[in-house]
Image (spheres, rainbow, N blue to C red):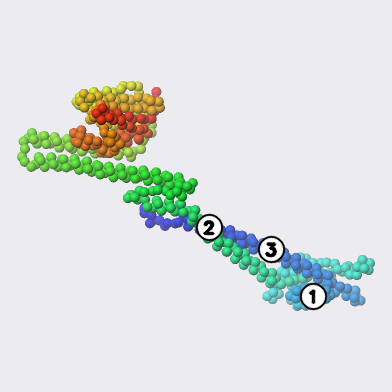
Amino acid sequence: MSAAAFKTRSLSGQLIGGVLLAELLCAALISVVAIGHEMHGRRRSFDVMLRGRADSLMGAVQDAEDPEDNVTVDPTELVLPAQDVYEVLNPAGRVLGHSPIWSAELQAALSSTHAAGTFNFRTGRVHYRAVRFDGVRVIDREENGGIRRPVTVLYASPTRDMWHESVEAEWFYIAASVLLLTVTCVALVWFLRRRLSPLQELAAIASRVSTRSWEFVPPVAVLSTTELAPIALSMEELLQGLQLAFERQRQLTGDAAHELKTSIAVLKSSLQLLSMVPRTKEQYEAGLDGLLLDSERMEELVSRMLTLARMEEAPVEEDEPCDLQAILGAVTERLRPVAELQQVDLEGDAGESRVVAMPADDADVLCSNLIVNALQHSSPNGRVSASVQAQGEVTVLQVVDQGEGIPESALPHVFERFYRADRSRSRASGGAGLGLSICKAIVERSGGTIHIQSVVGKGTEVTVVLPARPSSA
């Protein structure tokens, strides 16, 4: 499925949006808490102010100097806001005094609450907050300790100014929060973009990688970031492996096509020669034998290619040990007639059993390819020796010949597919340059290593090192 089928989302955009949303919620929560605290504080201050004014009203209660010995409220003792309203009552409910602003509606609203404390009420479109308390006014303290006169004070003040100041405070908090949020948003976006720039660089470099361009060089900023360095290094290693695999696959396809094209061209040429002029029975039989030989060579090439593909792609099965010494002995006996036909002395070291973690079929192919390759490059009266030895914790397989040797310049390429140091020998020997590639794939699948040493004119030594596995009793 193509990337276009999915809706792409920016990771940096999501991070910035998420952080900004969290910051906005925090700013809103702080503003609400601050506004609530401000409102609570202003209300308490307003209540304290009400009680203070009510206490001053209590001080204005004076002796009325009438025959009934009553008390009254002396307006000259009061300095109160004009918009406030009040009422002072004696225990019998008689009004001792009230504010200049007075009406039956105000009297009814103030007198409707009989419990002491603060309360709210409204008359018309004006909202009030009021306080009611019972007190005792002492008259003429100089005479016999004074006369105690109980009174009830009701005092109210409009809340318009308090709410106006509260709204101004709310707008201040909101404006301060918006300004702070704007500044922090700009700083946050700049900071996140700067800190996420290594990730964006990594994404930009990775987006340029394709089957035509494998260049992937992580920048220093990515490699110096703890979270991104493992990802970048893993991607670099992975892409190097993929590039190598693509190049090997491309090379295999080209080399295989070349080899098959050559074999098909030989077959076609042989058929054309047979059909050009009438020939004798013996000539036709010889021509058919050559065609059969070329067909077998093509079959062997395809078989080796399939074997190499299986070795490189199939996973290694666990718990598939084999006795390498026994398999080497069996392969040596099977190829002895081939060695005698080429007048080469083939020797196999029949040592003690050595069990390795390798499938028996792979071990058979490994030993066969190494010995056949040694026989093909040995001269008559030469010698090929194969042995299996234990060296510490590993098992070593060695195949040594006294043949023509491999040039030093060719040694780095002997394990490459279809590589032959002397291409003129391929048709005579039947080789296609895949034997050692197959051996290398088998050894690496089993966790081992393979190495070749050779001297021109003296011979070649192939050494395979495999992790040993103890044989079961």
Mark-to-mark CA distance, 3 and 2: 34 Å
The reply to whether residue 350 is visible in this rendering is yes
Are there few (<14), some (14-19), or many (20+) residues within 10 Å of tag 1?
some
Q: What element carries label 3?
A: helix
Query: Between disc 2 and disc 1, whose residue precedes?
Result: 1
Front one among 445 and 138: 445
Q: Earlier in the sequence, mark 3 or mark 1?
A: 3
- Badge 1 amino acid: His
Q: In this view, does 334 lie to the left or right of 95?
A: left
Residue 208 horizontal/vertical position (percent): 37, 52
Q: In this figure, which residue is indicated by the disc labeled 2? A: 188
Q: Residue 40 carries which label?
A: 3
Q: Position of residue 73 (x, y in %)?
A: 83, 74
Nearer to us of marks 2 and 1 is 2
Q: Are marks 3 and 1 in contact (CB under 8 Å)?
A: no
Residue 472 vertical placement versus 423 (above, below): above
Circle number at residue 98: 1
Distance of label 2 from label 1 (alpha carbons): 61 Å
Identify the amino acid type marked 3.
Answer: His
| The image quarter in which residue 394 lies | top left
* Secondary element at image label 2: helix
